[in-house]
Image (spheres, rainbow, N blue to C red):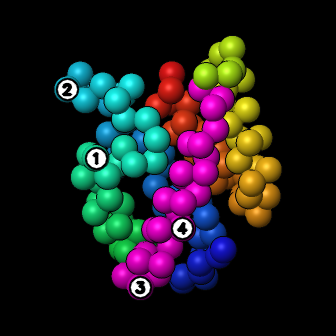
């Protein structure tokens, strides 16, 4: 799965840093209640993600790519590493290893971004 626009390869990587545009938790919305890929939908951020992606790739490419990205996010969050690992670093490695077995075609940069989000959500 690759998307190229303006000579830049986007692949399955995010278009912003992991901490931009996503509220991973606050005193009003505790992190523990938001685990999993659909936590963004509950926070109403799906429209924001779509708009950001469209601003980089165009509406058609964003409409095609966003569901694929959400599916990859869901596959990553399907890992039970949060429960099985003894610490944060081990949890990230275990979740990333689980995901790599499912999706060997996904770049290390994309896996690193997903790992960051996963370990942040489950810290």
Residue 60, which numbered label? 3
- Residue 74 included in the magenta stretch of the image: yes
Spot occupied by residue 75 in the image (x, y as percentages of width and height): 61, 51
Q: SS of the residue at dot 4?
A: helix
Spot occupied by residue 65 in the image (x, y as percentages of width and height): 50, 73
Report the Cα–Cα distance between label 1 and label 2: 14 Å
Report the Cα–Cα distance between label 1 and label 4: 19 Å
Spot occupied by residue 45 in the image (x, y as percentages of width and height): 29, 53
In the picture, measured across the screen, residue 82 lies left or right of residue 57, that is right
Q: Residues within 10 Å of mark 4 (few under 14, many from 20)?
A: some
* Residue drawn 49% across the image and 59% down it: 70
Residue nearest the viewer, comparing 15 with 47: 47
Residue 68, which numbered label? 4
Mark 1 or mark 2, which has the lower sequence index?
A: 2
Mark 2 or mark 4, which has the lower sequence index?
A: 2
Report the Cα–Cα distance between label 2 and label 4: 30 Å
Q: Which residue is mark 1?
A: 42
Q: Residues within 10 Å of mark 2 (few under 14, many from 20)?
A: few
Q: SS of the residue at dot 1?
A: helix
């Amino acid at each position: 799965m690759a998307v190229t626009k303006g000579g830049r390869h986007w692949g399955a990587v995010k278009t912003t840093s992991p901490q931009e545009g996503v509220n991973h938790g606050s005193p009003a919305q505790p992190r523990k209640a938001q685990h999993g890929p659909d936590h963004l939908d509950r926070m109403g951020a799906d429209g924001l993600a779509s708009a950001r992606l469209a601003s980089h790739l165009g509406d058609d490419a964003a409409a095609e790519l966003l569901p694929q990205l959400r599916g990859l996010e869901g596959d990553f969050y399907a890992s039970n590493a949060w429960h099985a690992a003894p610490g944060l670093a081990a949890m990230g490695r275990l979740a990333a290893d689980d995901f790599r077995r499912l999706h060997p075609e996904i770049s290390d940069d994309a896996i690193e971004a997903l790992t960051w989000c996963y370990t942040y959500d489950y810290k």
